[in-house]
Amino acid sequence: MPIRPSFAILAGAVVCVASAYALAERAAPGFVERLETQSDAAIADAGGEGVSARFVNINGSPTRHPVLEGGGALNEATRARVARAVYDVPGVGGVVWSDGTLRAESDEPTYQPLHCQEDVEGLLRTRSIRFEEASSALLPASRILLDEVAEALRPCLGSIIAITGHTDKAGTEPGNLALSMERARVVREALVRRGIPRDGLRASGVGSSRPVEGLAPSDPANRRIEFSVIRTEPLRPTPVDTPGAR
């Protein structure tokens, strides 16, 4: 019996996707090993004794966004220099410290918020973007809410939109920091799929370090996403951590 063209095309597409996935799975560990080796050398050159770079996300999968661990005895200038050295390794994404004492921030001045932020805050006043427990998977109701958030942000396209992930106090702070960042990235990608330009979105996570005012740090209501919308000014984002108060 002759094979219908549509079936042949579908079968070929499935084979291509499966092959690409398999190749990516095999390539990822080698890619991360290269980043680890080069990052170790960069850390040593920057004077980061006792510091290591972990290229694994909260799900145990390889990632190019490392978390730096150790080096608690180093001063802030050295820690910032170590983070910059790791970020300069080709292929490395954003760099954060596991203890949350350094934040990924811009070195540009802060500008006046736009009305879009008020619109988004109005949407989130009685509802929140929620995830499965200890996961970055969005709940179905949150996908609907993100449709509304994207519409509220649309009039201010061209602005810089900061997406900040928060967790409650449950779990270790390195895990909370990684989870909050992963959730912020998931929201960023969800907004991109809804037509918000990626170059205007900045995702970051602060773990449990900034609980809602009036709430205990362990309150589940601290698990949230916040948005900041600022005027269209040429910002120079700094993906490497800058010193913050301990």
Image (cartoon, helix red, strand yellow):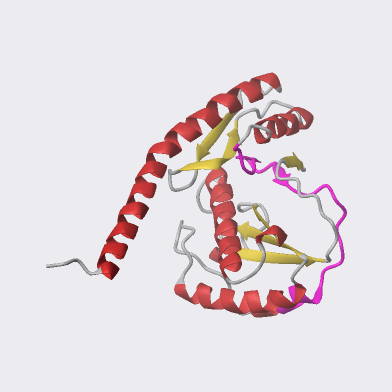
Instruction: Report x, y in % for residue 137.
Output: 46, 62
Q: On the rendered image, what quadrant is the N terminus found in?
A: bottom left
Q: Is residue 55 magenta?
A: no
**Rendered image quadrant of residue 190:** bottom right
In reply to whether residue 92 is colored magenta, the answer given is yes
Number of marks present in the image shown: 0
- Residue 121 visible in the snapshot: no
Q: Residue furthest left?
A: 1
In this view, the residue in front, 210 or 200, is: 200
The magenta span reads 91-119
Q: Quadrant of the C terminus?
A: top right
- Residue 82 is situated, as x and y percent measured from the top left of the image, at 70, 29
Q: Residue at x 44, y 48 (%)?
A: 59
The residue sitting at 61% across, 79% down in the picture is 148
Query: Which residue is painted at 70% across and 41% down in the image?
Result: 101
Which image quadrant for residue 5? bottom left
Viewer-closest of 59 and 90: 90
Q: Is residue 36 left or right of residue 243?
A: left
Q: Percent x, y for residue 160? A: 76, 62
Report the residue that reaches farthest toward the front.
Answer: 2
- Could you tell me if residue 159 is visible in this image? yes
Q: Is residue 207 above or below residue 90?
A: below
Give the left or right position of residue 161, taking residue 64 as reference: right
Q: Is residue 243 above or below residue 131?
A: above
In the displayed structure image, the side of residue 110 where residue 91 appears, left or right: left
Position in image of residue 242 (x %, y %): 76, 41
Tell me which secondary structure the magenta stretch mostly adopts: loop
From the viewer's perspective, tell me whether residue 231 is left or right of residue 173.
right
